[in-house]
Structure formats: C-alpha cells, structure tokens
Amino acid sequence: MRKTLCLLMIAGLLLSLAPRVRGEGPELELHAPSAILMDAATGTVLYEKNADQPRQPASVTKVMTLLLVMEALDSGQIRWEDPVTASSAAAGKGGSQIYLEEGEQLSMDEMLKSVVVSSANDCATALAEHVAGSEAAFVSRMNQRAEELGMQNTHFVNCTGLDDQPEAKEHLTTARDVALMSRELLRHDAIRRYTTIWMDTVRNGAFGLSNTNKLVRFYEGTTGLKTGYTSGAGHCLSASAQREGLELIAVVLGADSSSHRFEDAKTLLNWGFANYALIDPMEGVQPEPLPVRLGAREQLTPAAAQSGPILLEKELQGSVTRELELPESLEAPVEAGQVLGTLRVRAGERLLAELPLTAPEAVPRLSFWQIWLRVFHAIFIG
C-alpha cells in the first residue's frame, strides 16, 4: 500500500515538474544558426532552432568548468579560503587572460571573478588543476558530469574552449546541452555574485576586469552567464535573465558577430518574457484540518508534497483554477507522507498539474485503553 501511494505521489510530481518541450514556436528572426530558449525553473524548452546541432562552444565551455568548481566548493572538496596557485601550464594559456605568472597565487574569489567576468583562460586552468590535480583529470570529470545531466551531444577536450589543440575539433556541444548545464549552474546562487558584475578589479585594484557579456549592463534583469568566441566557433553566448520571478536561458551558438549574438539573445528573452509566466500551484490554497478517527491526534492538516512553479502562457493566467479533492475524515493509523488527497490546477479545461496532498506527520491509532480513557474523560469530566 505504501509503495502504491509513493508511486501516485511521484506521478503527480512528474506531471508538474518534468522538463517539457513546447509545440511549434514562432518564426523568430535570428542570425545564429543554432539557438534555444529554456525556462530555468522547469527546464521547459520554449523555442529552439537546430538545438541539437553539434558546434564548438568556445568559452561558453567555462559554464561546465564553473559548475564543477561550485559543486566542489559546496561539497567541501575545496574551500572558499583556499589560495589557488598558477602552474606553468595555467600561466602559459593564451586567449583571454589576466596574465598569471607561474607560482602566482590568487584567492578563490579573484580566480572565479576573473573567469566569469573576463573569461580568463589562465584562471580557468588554475581552478581546474586545483579541483582535480590536472586539466586532463578535470576534463574527464566535465564529460562525466555532462553525461549525468543528459547532455547527449557533448564532448569536452579542455576546460577553456580554446581551439589551439589538434583535438579541439572534437570539442563539441549543442545549444540544448549548453542550456542544460547553464540551468544547473544557476542553481548555485553564489555564482550570481560574479555573473552580474559589470566592472571590477583583482590584484588589489591593479588589474581591471570588464564583463564580456554586455547584457549585464544593457539588458534589464540579466543574471549571467557566459560569452565565447573563436574563429572556428563563431560568436557564442549563454544568456540568462529574470523578470517577475521568471528566469530564462537563451543560448546562441555560431553567430557571425558579437552584436548579432546579443541581438539574438535579446530577441529570445524578450519573446519569452512577453509570452510566459510562472504560477505557484499552491497560491491561495489552504487545506482545512481533517478529523482523524481513533487517532492519537484529533486533527491533521494535509500538506502539499514538494512542488515547483508551473510555467504557462500569460494569456491563460486569468483562467487558472485550483481544485482540492480530500476525504471528509481520516482513520488512524496515518503514516507520515501518506497521500491524503489531490490538488488539481487547471487553465480552462487544460490540466496543468495534479499534486498529491500528504500527511506531514504520523498519527498512531489509539490503543484499547486509550480509547476507554478518552470515553471516560468525555463522560465524567467533560
């Protein structure tokens, strides 16, 4: 019985939380050959254009590099207080950099800031070596994590996205896969301290940083995330922005100019914010306490199992209704987590979510003597 109840609860959650793909989207005018728009909260794809076409991502690669660093910090494998030392390999990296010298140490904060804001390849390599011991070991972890996230068309060969190695032609991902790892990185609130910086400095103010993501300054609500460019990859961007509680991820790969990648990202984000919204399935819902027959507690208030927000078209917001289905009473014993009823959220005739309402705690059944004691109390004491 308990297994059946758990399965029902899981089914309801899957209906409301599982990533979904929207139907045929509009004909948006984009310059880039590959793009996608995803809702960060639910993983729903709102728009896509050649989203599964393998392409070189350039420095957008560093989204995965940053993700592994943040996960290592969260797990305690590395610490915020750690100094990070530049090896000869890190100091020798080309492309965007802050010109680390071999043996130079910077704080974790300054290393992360340099990678996020200025796309510093030397700092990205130093962080990779700090986490895994070597860039090669770190890249192995990158590919493993990509597999875990369902990034089916991704293969990394370095932690920077540089194409200065013979095997760089095998360094490939897709717009969909970039959106998946971007969504995972945005779960780490600490990264937003860096992805929203416009200008800053490191080395006690001696070296200036300017964000390569111009949306941070020029697009309302921007929360990140990462730019990239090589001659082989073209101009790439994973852009995230948040308005009225809705956070969207726009990925653009292979644009022919920097201005076009930012224009494409704004086109995707503007369309998403104009047409979609998030609603709380439990908004305005307060289940009444249910009497519990023969229970150690006389009442129990059903609680919603963990549920995320629901994404829907803005035009449907006014038609949203919520319907509770609960019994008139319960009979003890009641197990913690036991499914007691259902909340259905609809927009007109369309079912948006079906969420189980569960028992927040167990209610044991009264023993024979406890029942008689309660009866005695009611009759003789009142």
Image (cartoon, rainbow, N blue to C red):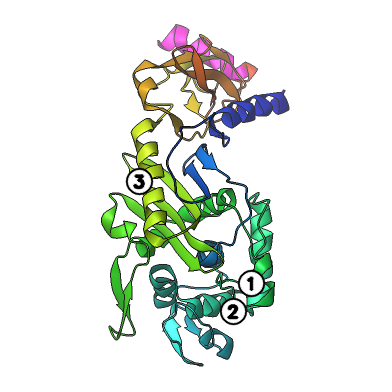
Which of the 4 image quarters holds residue 116?
A: bottom left
In the image, is residue 187 above or below residue 137? Answer: above
- Amino acid carrying label 3: it is Gln
Q: Amino acid at mark 2?
A: Glu
Q: If the image is split into quadrants, where does the C terminus sit?
A: top left
Considering depth in this image, is 3 or 68 the residue closer to the camera? 68
The residue drawn where x is 46% and y is 30% is 310
Is residue 21 among the parts visible in the rendering?
yes
Asked if residue 341 lies in the magenta stretch, the reply is no
Q: Is residue 64 left or right of residue 196?
A: right
Could you tell which of marks 1 and 3 lies nearer the N-terminus? 1
In the image, what residue type sits under mark 1?
Phe
**Residue linked to disc 2:** 129
For marks 2 and 1, the one nearer the N-term is 2
Residue at 34% in and 18% down: 318
Q: Reply yes or no: does residue 371 show up in magenta.
A: yes
Q: Position of residue 122 (x, y in %)?
A: 50, 81
Identify the residue position indicated by label 3 in the image: 242
Q: How many neighbours does mark 1 have within 10 angstroms: few (below 14), some (14-19), or many (20 or more)?
A: many
